Amino acid sequence: MIDAVITAMLRETMPDAEVRVYDMTGTMDHLEVFVRTKAFQGISPLDRHRMVEKALAPARADGRIHALQIRTATPEDTNG
Amino acid sequence: MADLHDEIKREIADNTILVYGKGTKDAPRCGFTAETIQFFNAFGYPFAVVDVLENMPKRQALSEQTDWQTLPKVFIAGQFYGDTDILEPMAKSGELAKLLEKSFEGKGVTPSIQLR
């Protein structure tokens, strides 16, 4: 399942990542991903987004992910 | 290649709010581009949408310039802000309203929609 694939990919570079994947359209390729990790501490929103996209690049390249919305947080953030 | 970067530089300089996306303001051809248009419509400031759907060299130049692989790409007052993933939290915190006010200061532009 794509959520397991995404979680595994993210944890390669962010081992502590809490990951939630939401299917936006029922086709399992228009996804929203929420990622909470210590790795985001002190990192700008743009760079957090780049970190997630870089980790998921293989699933982007082969089309498993077509559209992706990303929400990020650190363990200290209350949102998400 | 250089003329592409000049074209991009000019578009960014000429538009306080600039959205590179798929399709036009009146006919967006991608959900995220449409969402970004609605997002900025809610602020009432003028903004431009440049359609790069079919222009792969320009999309490549933009991706390299911003280290950001997806569309839409939003620039405000010459600065890159990603897309609504980045802008929505800024809108919620009030940061974006302040940024837009400052960006349009002295340009004789007042938003058509008054922000509460």
Image (tube, coloured by chain):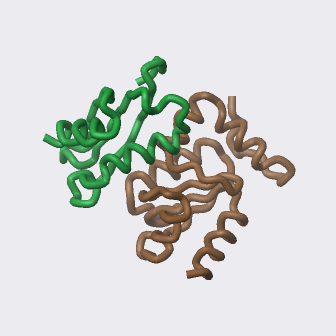
For the residue pair B109 and A40, the one nearer the viewer reads as A40
Q: Position of residue B53 (x, y in %)?
A: 42, 70
Q: Is residue A59 above or below residue A4?
A: below
Q: What is the tally of numbered marks visible in this picture?
A: 0
Residue at 35% over, 33% down = A34
Q: Colour of chain B?
A: brown
Q: Is residue A35 left or right of residue A76?
A: left
Q: Nearer the viewer, residue B91 or A34?
A: A34
- Residue A4: image x %, image y %? 17, 37
Residue B26 seen in this snapshot = no
Q: Residue furthest right?
A: B106
Position of the C terminus of chain A by quadrant: top left
Instruction: Give x and y (percent) for residue A16.
Output: 32, 27
- Chain given the colour green: A
Which residue sits at x=24%, y=36%? A7
Q: Residue at x 18, y 47 (%)?
A: A27
In depth, the one of B53 and A7 nearer the eye is A7
